[in-house]
Image (cartoon, grey):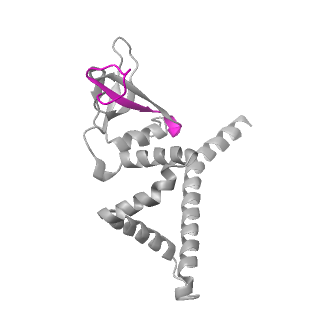
Amino acid sequence: MKRIYQYFFRGLLTALPLGLTVYLLYAFLTWAEQIAMWWVRPIIGDFYIPGLGLLLGLAGIVLLGYLVSHKYIYQLLSLIEFPFTNLPVVKSIYSSLKSFADYFAPHKKNDSQQAVTLKIPGHELEMVGLITRQSTQHLPAGFMQGDRVAVYLPMGYMIGGYTVFVPRSWLTPIDMPVEEVMRATLFAWMSKPD
């Protein structure tokens, strides 16, 4: 009986990621198709084209990217963002998500985005983090000055993380893109290398 339980849980752990991925893709595509049909049904009538929702969704994202690339449209977008950046609870959620997205935006790549290992002298513990600030200048009074950087230490399964200000000498750069570090951290570094 014990062996049956082992096989069951192995099978479940194998099927779960695949099943959830397929389900989420199916749910997204179904939702996109429903929105597309609601939007274009008055124009095309009962004529149905499979995949139209996905096509319109991708076209909408590309169009939005094109529009916000223009200065005046970007300013208009900031007016649309105004309620999201000023309502007490919504502001916290929206600002956090926007800052996180901006950090990984391709047009914002800079030298502050660097994956590092942090090792406190005299300790064998090694932590993986991301440099988020190259200096403590322009921070409020109370921060220690010197050659210090801010390092974000993400927690597994993206339930949070810690930002620590440490001497630059405690850090060792690692040859890994920021996105790969975040992906590996998401699953507590359990995934196998490609």
**Which residue occupies the foreground of this view, 150 or 10?**
150
Closer to the camera in the image, 2 or 176:
176
Q: Quadrant of the C terminus?
A: top left
Please determine whether, in this image, residue 78 is positioned above or below residue 144. below
- Estimate the x, y position of residue 161 in percent, counting from the top left: 47, 32
Residue 183 position by quadrant: top left
- Give percent across and percent down for residue 104: 36, 47
| Residue 48 in sight | yes
Vertical position of residue 92 compared to residue 46: above or below: above
Asked if residue 51 can be seen in this view, the reply is no
Please give the range of residues in magenta. Answer: 137-159
Assess whether residue 149 is covered by the magenta stretch.
Answer: yes
Q: Which of 83 and 192 lies nearest the eye of the viewer?
A: 83
Lateral position of residue 31 relative to residue 148, left or right: right
Residue name at image x 29 percent, y 52 percent: 107
Q: Does the segment drawn in magenta span residue 71? A: no
Rendered residue at 38%/13% (across/down): 123
Q: Quadrant of residue 149?
A: top left
Q: Residue at x 40, y 26 (%)?
A: 164
